[in-house]
Image: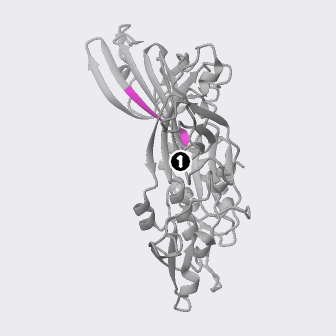
Amino acid sequence: MSRRESTFDEIIIESNDGSNSVDVVAGVRSIDYYEDLFSPIITCKITIVTTGDAMPGKDGKGLGIYNGLPLRGGERVSIKIAANSDTNKPLDFSTNPKDYLFVSSISNVIAENKREAFTLNLVPREAITNETTRVSGKYPTDSPIDVSVRKIIKDYLKTDKPVSVDESSNTYGFIGNLKRPFNILVWLASKAVPKRQDSGAGFLFYQTQEGFNFRSIDALISSKAVASYAYTDVVKNQTESNNDFNILKYSIDRNQNLLEKLRLGAFASFRAAFNPIDCTFTLPQKGLFTQKDYKTKNLGQELKLPAISNDSNQSLGDLPSRIITSVVDIGTMEKDVSLKPNADPFQYQSQAVMRYNLLFTQTVKMTVPLNTNLKAGDIIECDFPKVSADEKPEYDDEQSGLYMIKELCHHYDNENSLTSMKLVRDTFGKYGTNNK
């Protein structure tokens, strides 16, 4: 059951003026659906090959879709792909017109006599709204960041899709400055601190098939694994459902880029801030930030860093490798000037830098049989083989363990249905704070 063909129930393209539509199911060669933790929107690509009589013209003669509809960008597309197993759910953007996708561009156009091929690049309606809307007004300094996030999504994106927002403990006042909603939401994610006492700074704003998300990284890491996959050279009988949880192929893209992490201050940093009210600088004893000051959630074992030198008791997590300078934000057009910072950078700045960078300690690319239940941000458990001379195959407890889905692609064509993923992990080892 690892590779099963897909059934395209409905792929209908509507013309911009709504006067015409065409069902292109017969011409679809492949569909790729994408989610990414670092993308505010989902995207989709449809490759279509049709003949010159794919749709009727005004004179009764057949026309190609590209110039017959015509395709110029902005067309609505409804998609429904049937589930190819009892455990998978369909990919459905056809039930509600508000869920339809829109053509953002047409690429790879090939026009020949009686035949044409092209790729539709699709985005949700909110992507277009984001480009035609600007955030204005002032958001008060006593407003929690999650409250501002909900307000921006409601007032400017005007989405009917579900929205999941984790509460933040810190407040932040700002002016919209006519920036796009997505730009502000991603910017606020880098400043938010979770309300949960056992979590550190660092949020993500992204979309999945289920809706929009403004989630704490530590909250995502603390979630239970939704699936378990294992790599084996033995492919089971096609009638065995366990085949659905085999890793078809994988590659390790990154395994701790130490120099890059040091440049970014992922292990330790020094923060120097200037206060424009009293013209003071950060005291040296307050500016230092190390791993000991921030206990993050881990997907595996606690990360152990090498010593600075052979005869030193200090590790790379004890001495700052980056100096972060800033001017303290005292307020946003406040009537009463206060010495209290607006979103104290010492609450989130170095913590967020550490959290975002540690998340990419390991990156793995992996392909599995189609699993439409998976989404970006999910935690999955993976067992990878141990490299040894032993004839008895074993799994590697250092490489195996829990991973977060950073991005995924559900691929559909007439022969195969596959899910490819990019997985990230903040440490090594199979057993740690999240899976004991």
Q: Residue furthest left?
A: 113
Q: Residue at x 70, y 44 (%)?
A: 224
Is residue 42 rendered to the left or right of residue 257? right
Farthest-out residue, top: 60
Q: Nearer the viewer, residue 338 or 233?
A: 233
Residue at 49 percent across and 59 percent down: it is 179
Q: What's the amino acid at mark 1?
A: Val
Q: Is residue 122 magenta?
A: yes
Q: Position of residue 229 (x, y in %)?
A: 60, 33
The segment highlighted magenta reads 119-126
Indicate the secondary structure of the residue bearing disc 1. Answer: strand
Query: Residue at the spot x=55%, y=88% of the render?
Result: 283
Q: Is residue 224 magenta?
A: no
Percent x, y of residue 78: 55, 26
Residue 110 in picture, x, y percent from top left: 29, 23
Image position of 383 with respect to 85: above or below = below
Residue at the spot 67% in from the left edge and 59% down from the top edge: 146
Number of marks present in the image shown: 1
- From the viewer's perspective, is residue 119 above or below residue 288? above
Picture quarter with the N terminus: top right
Which of the pair 319/188 is nearer the observer?
319
Q: Which residue is mark 1?
A: 424
Visible residue check, residue 155: no
Query: What is the x, y in percent for residue 8?
Result: 54, 17
